[in-house]
Image (tube, helix red, strand yellow):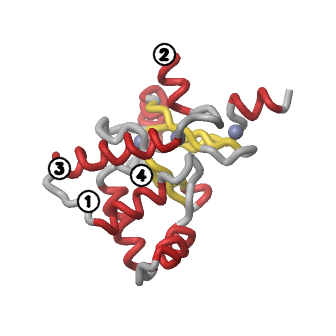
């Protein structure tokens, strides 16, 4: 795996996060344009809020922030925006935290491993086709129809592991 893939997965705590947000917005615009969909101002704002850090954010926290922004948003509005972003593959739901995180490679449809650092709360995703292949094999054996192949793994990111040494 290239250094670039690794550094993209868990960016250093001192990285320029504005650049991550800008890149994510450019990708989001491209994904929507490709599919003839519109990134409305509200969807865009929800997307930006999901991307405010590399930590998953709950729908409730998003709603609170929108209200603080002066939006008259209500829970269903936020859920609809999140549904849209999920369908476009622009964000992922982190089931174990019931929260959402921005996708850093939305243009490639992917089965992913989501790695959650229990120390800093950051989340990274890696497209791991080997994981989905073995899920498929196991499912085949027991006659199970797979809907989601996202595996969530909790542990410690490199920066946090280094800091605790
Ligand atoms: Zn960042
Ligand atoms: Zn992704
Ligand atoms: Zn960490």
* Dot 3 or dot 4, earlier in sequence: 3
Q: Could you tell me which secondary element the residue under label 3 belongs to?
A: helix
Task: Residue under label 1, please give it.
Answer: 39
Q: Mark 3 packing: few (<14 Cα in 10 Å), some, or many (20+)? A: few
* Cβ–Cβ under 8 Å for marks 1 and 2: no
Task: Residue under label 3, please give it.
Answer: 33
Q: CA distance from mark 1 to mark 4?
A: 13 Å
Q: Please state which of residues 150 and 34 is positioned toward the viewer in this rendering.
A: 34
* Dot 2 or dot 3, earlier in sequence: 2
> Relative to residue 136, is residue 45 depicted above or below?
below
> Relative to residue 73, is residue 95 depicted above or below?
above
* Dot 1 or dot 4, earlier in sequence: 1
Q: CA distance from mark 2 to mark 3?
A: 30 Å
Left or right of 109, for residue 61 = right
Left or right of 93, for residue 163 = right
Q: Where does residue 34 sit, x and y in percent of width and height?
A: 16, 46
* Cβ–Cβ under 8 Å for marks 1 and 4: no
Of tags 2 and 3, which is closer to the observer?
3
* Cβ–Cβ under 8 Å for marks 4 and 2: no
Q: CA distance from mark 3 to mark 1?
A: 9 Å
Q: CA distance from mark 3 to mark 4?
A: 17 Å
Task: Residue under label 4, please give it.
Answer: 91
């Amino acid at each position: 795996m290239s250094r670039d893939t690794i550094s993209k997965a868990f960016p250093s705590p001192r990285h320029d996060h504005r650049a991550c947000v800008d890149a994510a917005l450019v990708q989001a615009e491209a994904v929507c344009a490709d599919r003839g969909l519109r990134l409305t101002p509200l969807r865009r704002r929800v997307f930006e809020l999901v991307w405010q850090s590399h930590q998953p954010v709950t729908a409730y926290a998003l709603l609170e922030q929108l209200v603080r922004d002066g939006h008259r948003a209500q829970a269903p509005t936020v859920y609809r925006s999140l549904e849209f972003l999920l369908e476009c593959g622009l964000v992922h739901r982190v089931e174990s935290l019931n929260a959402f995180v921005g996708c850093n490679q939305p243009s490639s449809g992917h089965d992913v491993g989501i790695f959650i650092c229990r120390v800093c709360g950051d989340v990274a995703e890696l497209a791991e086709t080997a994981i989905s292949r073995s899920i498929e094999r196991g499912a085949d054996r027991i006659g199970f129809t797979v809907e989601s192949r996202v595996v969530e793994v909790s542990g410690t990111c490199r920066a946090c592991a280094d800091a605790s040494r």
